[in-house]
Amino acid sequence: MAISVDVAKDPSAIKVKFLGNFTKRQIICFSAAAVTGVPFYLMTRKVIGTDVAAIMMVAVMLPFFFVAMYEKDGVPAEQYLWQIITMKFLRPGIRRYKAGNLYEQLKEREKMEKEVEALEARQKKWKEGRAGKAGSKEKA
């Protein structure tokens, strides 16, 4: 009869327990939640009632519990949130290639060429008109 003990594949994944079954991080976060939540409850229970104050106390304490318990891929909550903030807001995003519509460009160019031709025709008429007036002044 053999005795078997489960051993973690990655020893670095084992969390060192500090007090009971909690890590130092969890103890600190739970203490911070208690330091903020309990005084909040005590100050607001007479003003808004005990039920509402208790619910609001839980809402005030939830971010601390989230930071204490959440971990994704070995990264704690605040580091993970900081990575998201830097990726979405602080660093430039991925610049996607945007192809221009060739037909739109050709249409725009044709429109510009027509406009230039119209301006040149107006200028030519204006010059002919000026030349005609200058010729009539010389005759007079």
Image (cartoon, grey):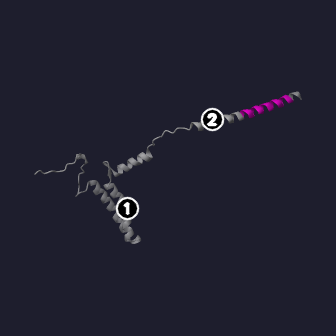
Q: Residue at x 68, y 34 (%)?
A: 116
Q: Is the magenta stretch mostly helix, strand or loop?
A: helix
- Identify the magenta region: 119-136
Q: As shown in the figure, which amino acid type bears the numbered disc 1? A: Val
Q: Is residue 115 left or right of residue 9?
A: right
Residue under pointer 2: 109
Query: At 34% from the left edge and 52% from the top edge, which residue is drawn?
Result: 77
Q: Is residue 130 magenta?
A: yes
Secondary element type, mark 2? helix
Q: Position of residue 65 (x, y in %)?
A: 33, 58
57 vs 99: above or below: below
Q: In which quarter of the image is residue 112?
A: top right
32 vs 135, left or right, is left
Horizontal arrangement in the rendering, residue 25 relative to residue 4 (left or right): right
> SS at mark 1?
helix
Q: Residues within 10 Å of mark 1 (few under 14, many from 20)?
A: some
Q: What residue type is labelled 2?
A: Arg
Q: Which of marks 2 and 1 is nearer the N terminus?
A: 1
Q: In which quarter of the image is the C terminus?
A: top right
Q: Point out residue 35 in the picture as x, y percentages from the top left corner.
A: 33, 61
**Which residue matches tag 1?**
60
Mark 2–mark 1 distance (CA, rounded to whole Å): 62 Å
**Residue appearing at x 35%, y 51% in the figure:** 78
Q: Where is residue 125 in the image (x, y as percent from the top left)?
A: 77, 33
